[in-house]
Image (tube, rainbow, N blue to C red):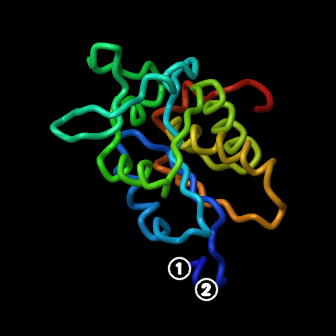
Amino acid sequence: MQLERRAVTPDYVVSPVGSGAYASGLFLPFVDDERTHLVGVQAAGRDEDYASVASKGVMYGTKSFVLQDGEGLPIYRDTEAGGLAHNAVGPQHATWADRGQAFYTLVNDFDAAQAARALAVYEGVLVNQETGHALAYASRLAQTLEPTANIIVGITGSGHRDLSRLHTKGDA
């Protein structure tokens, strides 16, 4: 509604993606708008090695993109962001990726925690680790865009359960 009142079309919509239910709802109003780029951010855990193992497969009875080993067995993400620990995305995300309507990327847990801490320290907004993944990507992305670009970042919940992990002494 705020976007409509201001006659603004976002350039990017960035959302954390585990199984993808939250991101699907956030992306849906923009999926057919070629002016808006949809970016799903998944957890890479402690590193970003998972990018090479996501491939088409069947998980939970649905053909989708699945983290799997060379024999087709599922690999589970080693991440502190529990909501992003899924090894497959829902079929809607797989379809959007196939059609080029959405792009999916990875952010490691360290960068996600830093982004969540920065938002808490500088803006007083406490978000969870899942949201930190989207914030970290959006922060990197913003540095490459014109100052007038609009980015929507999906915030999936408060950071109360992640408070002990996100606690830091000093600045973010």
Q: Residue at x 59, y 26 (%)?
A: 108
| Place of residue 58 in the rendered image (x, y in percent of width and height, measured from the top left) | 22, 33
| Place of residue 94 in the rendered image (x, y in percent of width and height, measured from the top left) | 36, 46
The amino acid sitting under disc 2 is: Arg
Gap in angstroms between the C-alphas marked 2 and 1:
6 Å
Q: In the current view of this chain or complex, which residue is farthest to the right?
A: 147
Q: Are marks 2 and 1 in contact (CB under 8 Å)?
A: yes
Q: Residue at x 84, y 62 (%)?
A: 147
Q: Secondary structure at mark 2?
A: helix
Q: Which residue is mark 2?
A: 5
| Place of residue 28 in the rendered image (x, y in percent of width and height, measured from the top left) | 41, 65
Q: Residues within 10 Å of mark 1 (few under 14, many from 20)?
A: few
Q: In the shown orientation, is residue 147 left or right of residue 9?
A: right
Q: In the shown orientation, is residue 139 left or right of residue 166?
A: right
* The one of 70 and 42 positioned closer to us in this rendering: 70
Up-down: is 62 above or below 68?
Answer: below
Q: In the shown orientation, is residue 6 left or right of residue 149?
A: left
The amino acid sitting under disc 1 is: Met
Q: Residues within 10 Å of mark 2 (few under 14, many from 20)?
A: few
Up-down: is 1 above or below 51?
Answer: below
Q: Which residue is mark 1?
A: 1
